[in-house]
Image (cartoon, rainbow, N blue to C red):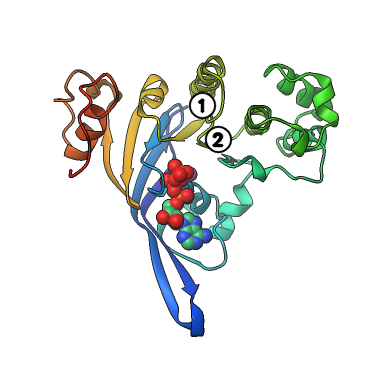
Amino acid sequence: MTGTLLEVHGLEVDFVQYERGLRRRTVHALTGMDLTADAGEVVALVGASGAGKSLLASAVLGLLPANAVERGNVLFDGVRQDAAGRRRHAGRGMTLLPQATGFLDPLATVGRQVRRSAQLAGHDDPRGAAAQALARRGLGPEVLRRYPHELSGGMARRVLVAMATLSSPRVLLADEPTTGLPPADVGATLRELRTMADEGCAVVLITHELRAALEVADHVVICREGRTVDTADPAAFTGDGDALTHPFTRALWQALPGNGFRVAEGV
Ligand SMILES: Nc1ncnc2c1ncn2[C@@H]1O[C@H](COP(=O)(O)OP(=O)(O)OP(=O)(O)O)[C@@H](O)[C@H]1O
Ligand code: NI
């Protein structure tokens, strides 16, 4: 259960936009993302809102919109894959646990969607596996018949977690998996991701909550304004942050409540 399953090298993403009068404008959304995740690891990708975390996940899975232009390399299990190749792995070898619960199909029942994840992963009994996966997250059989709009935000998120884990991915990109969950469920979800890694999956945990990331991560990748700026060891996030070599990472740590209330601006 060793080996690098996901490598992202110098990933850049531009969006081509047309303004009034058909004037073309290029937005440089990602300008240099690097990330490596081995089997057995949780790699946290941490950064502020708009830093480019979700975009990296979409790009890795080949799910960028048509007006996006991508440069750089993405390797899955040591093999470079173009966007179409990555899309073929999506939902099988590589799974996205999406940030937006809008990823659920509004026209299909929860049961049908969760069973589909189980089927794709080759479960012998998709129906039983789906019911069990939901029950493990406190969602009873009545939820199977519901449509996504009949779920609360927290329930929808637990359905997404159930679908992602059922698909037994080798690489899991979990995009803000704990947002909107009550504290007890946050811990349970993080532990679940840790267990998936311990069983051989490479987990990329996308979050803006550094403290939560430190609880389960083996490495912390820090991104800022479309590029990764540092990869740090979770053990270095202690005390005043003197063990953190990058000034931006140190400032992020020091700015956390309880760490001195220093402001990270101007770094
Ligand atoms: N389809 C798009 N067209 C143009 N710009 C986009 C598009 N999608 C994302 N962006 C831009 O790319 C940048 C990164 O967005 P992204 O959603 O990856 O941020 P994030 O780090 O996931 O933030 P959050 O923590 O709020 O989820 C933002 O500036 C955003 O406006
Ligand atoms: Ni995001």
Using the image, determine if residue 70 lies above or below residue 47.
below
Label 2 residue SS: loop
The structure residue drawn at horizontal position 76% and vertical position 45%, both measured from the top left corner, is 106
Does mark 2 have its CB less than 8 Å from ligand 2? no
The structure residue drawn at horizontal position 18% and vertical position 30%, both measured from the top left corner, is 244
Residue 110 position by quadrant: top right
- Percent x, y of residue 86: 56, 52
- Does the residue at mark 2 contact the one at mark 1 (Cβ under 8 Å)? yes
Whether residue 50 is visible: yes
- Percent x, y of residue 248: 21, 39
Q: Which mark is residue 178?
A: none
Using the image, determine if residue 155 lies above or below residue 21.
above
List the single residue furthest toward the top. 184
Residue type at numbered disc 1? Gly
Label 1 residue SS: loop
Residue 234 position by quadrant: top left
List the single residue furthest toward the bottom. 21
Pick whichever, 119 or 27, lies toward us.
27
- Percent x, y of residue 150: 78, 34
Pick whichever, 187 or 155, lies toward us.
155
Binning the other alpha carbons within 10 Å of mark 2 as few (below 14), some (14 to 19) or many (20 upward) gives: many
State the residue position of label 2: 170
State the residue position of label 1: 200
Disc tally is 2
Along the horizontal axis of the image, is 16 left or right of 107?
A: left
Q: Earlier in the sequence, mark 2 or mark 1?
A: 2
Residue type at numbered disc 2? Arg
Residue 31 position by quadrant: bottom left
Locate the C terminus and report the quarter of the image it occupies: top left
The structure residue drawn at horizontal position 84% and vertical position 23%, both measured from the top left corner, is 142
The structure residue drawn at horizontal position 57% and vertical position 66%, both measured from the top left corner, is 66
